[in-house]
Amino acid sequence: MGFGPVAPEQDEPYFHAEWEKRALGVTLAAGGLGAWNIDESRHARESLHPAIYYSSSYYEIWIRALEVLLKRHGFLSDADLAAGKAVDGAATPKRVLKAEAVAAVLARGGPCDRPLAAPARFREGERVRTKTFNPTGHTRLPRYARGKLGTVEAVHDGFVFPDSNAHGEGENPQRLYTVVFDGSEVWGEGADPTLSVSIDAWESYLEPA
Amino acid sequence: MFNTPETHNLVVCTLCSCYPWSVLGLPPVWYKAPPYRSRAVIDPRGVLEEFGLTLSAETKIRVWDSTAELRYLVVPMRPEGSEKLDEAALADLVSRDSMIGTGLARVPA
């Protein structure tokens, strides 16, 4: 069905080729230039043409998206890529990640919890409906979970809102909720009757039921 | 999330590859690939069969579609025959897959 078997590999190595290690390192180091946030980088991956996205391995997706981000922010040109080295001038980065700082930067991570002034709009146990929409930009509400009736299972703290942060429109933090759906609500006829699926939804994804 | 005899938990990130990597290390390729990401929320029993895990027909399955903000770890059920084992021995029975939900804790020899 669909994309075929999961086909898990036994005792899988972290990397299947040396270049994958570099891909991870270069992507994280480029993030350290301070030109984009993680939401923008996820959106760059998810906006790759579907035919390219689905035929690329995981780290290929990272590198292709990194090219998009570097070009968008003036660090890379098509001429550079064609020549395999810097031939055009590049923007000056805000900062550069140095080797000696890597461990500390990775340990610190990028926490995205933020304080909120307003109280929660929804409470635990409340029935809610997820929004139906079709945004052209970044979102974290999966298509399968739009316009569905579910129950708030947990009310969480505030977090950066990816839908706006990915486009440089600010963090605009919102409260996060774990919302659980019956399998039949999501998939309808033929759904596994023992299945329930939950998502973590930002407050603006939800409406009262 | 604790697995119980009534409910088995499974974690996925359908949108990307969110994973509790600071605890479990970098995720495996299958976790980040379209087959698992799409089928885990549609046909988790079929996915678990591929991992050699067959749940009883009455067991409920709860699939957690994770986002970057909250990462989930499954706590597998204590296996039979492990009642007298200490923490270190018990830890030895817990696999990475059992903490994603695609496996169970190993039964002690």
Image (tube, helix red, strand yellow):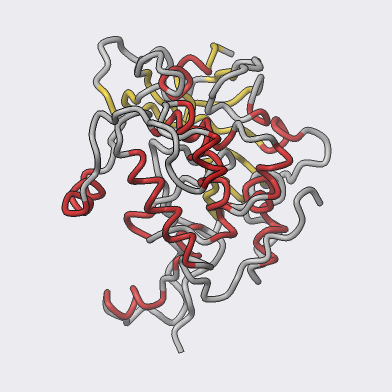
- The location of residue A110, given as percent across then percent down, is 29, 37
Q: Residue at x 44, y 33 (%)?
A: A88
Q: Is residue B72 above or below residue B96?
A: above
Residue A199 in view of the camera: no
Along the line of sight, the residue nearer the viewer: A86 or A199: A86
Tag count: 0
A45 vs B73, nearest the viewer: A45
Residue A28 vs residue A2: left or right?
A: left
Residue A192, position as x, y percentages in the image: 74, 46
Q: Position of residue A106 (x, y in %)?
A: 26, 49
Seen in the picture, residue B28 relative to A88 is either above or below; the reply is below
Which residue is rendered at x = 36% and y = 78% of the image?
B92
Identify the residue shown where x is 57% and y is 75%.
A10
At a point 77% along the width and 41% down the height, the residue shown is A191
In the rendered image, the vertical position of residue B19 relative to residue A175, given as above or below: below
Left or right relative to A104: residue A77: right
Q: Nearer the viewer, residue A39 or B45?
A: A39
- In the image, A145 versus A15, the foreground residue is A15
User: Residue B91's image quarter?
Assistant: bottom left
Q: Is residue A51 left or right of residue B82?
A: right
Could you say where residue B44 lies in the image, as x and y percent from the top left? 66, 53
Q: Can I make out residue A176 in this image?
A: yes
